[in-house]
Image: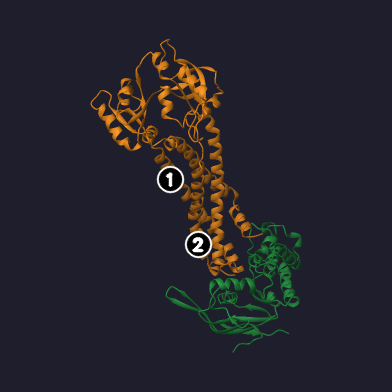
Chain colours: A orange, B green
Amino acid sequence: MNDATLIRKNLFRKRLRAILLMVSILVAFLIFGVLGALQNAFTAGTGTAAQERLVTVNRINFTVALPYAYWGRIQQVEGVRNAAPASWFGGYYQEPQNFVQSFAVDPETYLEAYPNEIVLPPEERAAWLEGRTCAIVGRALATQYGWSTGDRIPLMSNIWQNTDGSQAWELDICGVFDDTEGTYPTNYLMLHYEYFNESLAFGRDSFHWITINTTDPALNDQVSQEIDALFANSSAETSTTTEAAFNEAFMEQFGNIGLILTWVIGAAFATILMIVGTTMVMAVNERTREIAVLKTLGFTAPRIFRMVLWESLLLSFLGGLIGLGLASLAAAAASGALAGFLPSFGLSLTNVVTALVLMAALGIVTGLLPAYNAMQVRISEALGKI
Amino acid sequence: MTDASALYQLKGLSKRYTRGKETVAIFDGLDMTISQGDFIAIMGPSGSGKTTLLNLLGGIDKPSSGEVVFEGQRIDNLSQGRLAKWRAKNAGFIFQFYNLMPTLSAAQNVELPLLLTSLSGKARKERVKTALDIVGMVDRAGHRPGQLSGGQQQRVAIARAIVADPKVLLADEPTGDLDRTTADEILQTLQLLNKELGKTIIMVTHDPEAASYAARELHLNKGRFEEKGKA
């Protein structure tokens, strides 16, 4: 037996109370973990976006199209090295719930815009550039649906209609791309803009955004201003920002995830803090006589302080680690289903470290008062008589 | 002057409490000497200060003035931390209501004072077994207090008090919660500890029969001792 035995026995002396407290802490950390995983997924794009790339969209928002002619005019702006137009396809495979992140792009300029993000074997690259119905898919997406080069798939759109009256586009998978560093998502598909545009029943000759590489990143501000000035006072004014800013704005359409996360977690932790703190104070008060006996036997006040604090920390870490573990399992289970839409859904090392710090803080904050009270117990008062 | 052979010397001991605006003196200028190996029963009416005296002897409370000298060294001026260490090393406590930890087994309760020593786990286990053996509770080592009778719990409490081999046992009404037969068994155990192991025992009691097991009876009345000699 040692102090740890006493701490454990004291914590579980009322098993139901200890379990309920642990469950309340568990729930807080489960929420923390799942929301953290969600935030990771939403902010993944901003993390990998190159600062030197610019994106031009309609000033209203990116879902409002820009005329096709803008592409040529933007290419003429001084300082623009490459301009790659793209349209949101809104694809799904077989069933609407099988979401496929897919874009209609100009292959040549798009490959030039993303040399590190899209790496294809030379023969597959050539095949994509040549084949009108060719599409390329990222490794993660190909794995998810079991696609490989040579497959022919019908890709449905939940936005567009084909001239044949259907919402399906027949695509030949001509290549499966990777990225150079393993850090960029490969959960999307790209088809030829021309093939897409020609077969559209409506909304032809337009695109949703254009990715721009400048000749020198130092020119970015100037190029942005020039592009937006070029289309000022037109029916489709533009807004040109860095790709990172564009991605952030894209994610903000779902709400300020960071703020939501902070409020939800803050509310959960404030509640837990009060519940656990009050219960710990009561639990230690119930043991005043036992604490007095320990002091009589020769246990010093600082030792008793430490024992109560460790008890609170043990409770916090037990509940917290189980909660975080469940969040990790939930994230792993959900990541498969969400791979097409949120490829980075999962706990990061930062989440885990933050959670551990929170567990320690929760344990200390809820344990300080009862530990202090225990330390201050006066033997003669607590026992009445020895 | 200090008596080198004395275990305790109380010199001009005073203890006063403040109740509202009133100051109440429990005793004032108390002198007393307790020798090594004594078995003293302290009796007296309620409120005479028996328990307060035991608290002072056990380093649980501090006098308002005067000195508590233990083996030639004052303990009344020690810090709380040093007093705790002094108690762990020198004093064993036996309570009226046993005060065992309900979540621990009998053996674990007895082992508690040994957690304050540098003994190895194996040595602690041996000591616990010996202490339980002395009080006849080895076969109940794994039982929790709730599974033991009052007399059995008090035996475990005595084992806890002696396990660290303290120089003095301080017992406050150790049989106050027990029936006569069980009380006699407990008192015989204390007597055995005094006679066979030479433990100094200071026992507070209301019960004249319990006091009769002691070698000396001291009656505390109005802050003064009246000693009754024994044959």
Q: Is residue A240 left or right of residue A307?
A: left
Q: Where in the figure is residue A120, as x and y percent of width and height?
A: 50, 26
Q: Which numbered mark, 2 or 1, is in the foreground of this view? A: 1
Which residue corresponds to the image point at 43% horizontal and 44% vertical from the top-left?
Answer: A267
- State the residue in front, A29 or A272: A29
In the rendered image, the vertical position of residue A337 relative to residue B1, given as above or below: above
Q: Where in the figure is residue B3, as x and y percent of width and height?
A: 63, 87
Please identify the quarter of the rendering in which residue B6 is found.
bottom right
- State the residue in front, A91 or B206: A91
Which residue corresponds to the image point at 31% horizontal and 20% vertical from the top-left?
Answer: A69
Q: Is residue B63 visible?
A: yes
In the rendered image, the vertical position of residue A145 relative to residue A332, given as above or below: above
Instruction: Identify the amino acid type marked 1.
Output: Gly
Q: Where in the figure is residue B229, as x and y percent of width and height?
A: 68, 85
Indicate which disc residue A266 carries. 1
Please identify the quarter of the rendering in which residue B138 is found.
bottom right
Which residue corresponds to the image point at 52% horizontal and 60% vertical from the top-left?
Answer: A371
Please identify the quarter of the rendering in which residue A205 is found.
top left
Q: Which residue is mark 2?
A: A373
In the rendered image, the vertical position of residue A188 relative to residue A256, given as above or below: above
- State the residue in front, B57 or A201: A201
Q: Chain of mark 2?
A: A
Tag 1 or tag 2, which sits nearer the N-term?
1
Q: CA distance from mark 2 to mark 1?
A: 27 Å
Q: Is residue A94 visible?
A: no
Which residue corresponds to the image point at 56% horizontal and 56% vertical from the top-left?
Answer: A310
- Which secondary structure, mark 2? helix
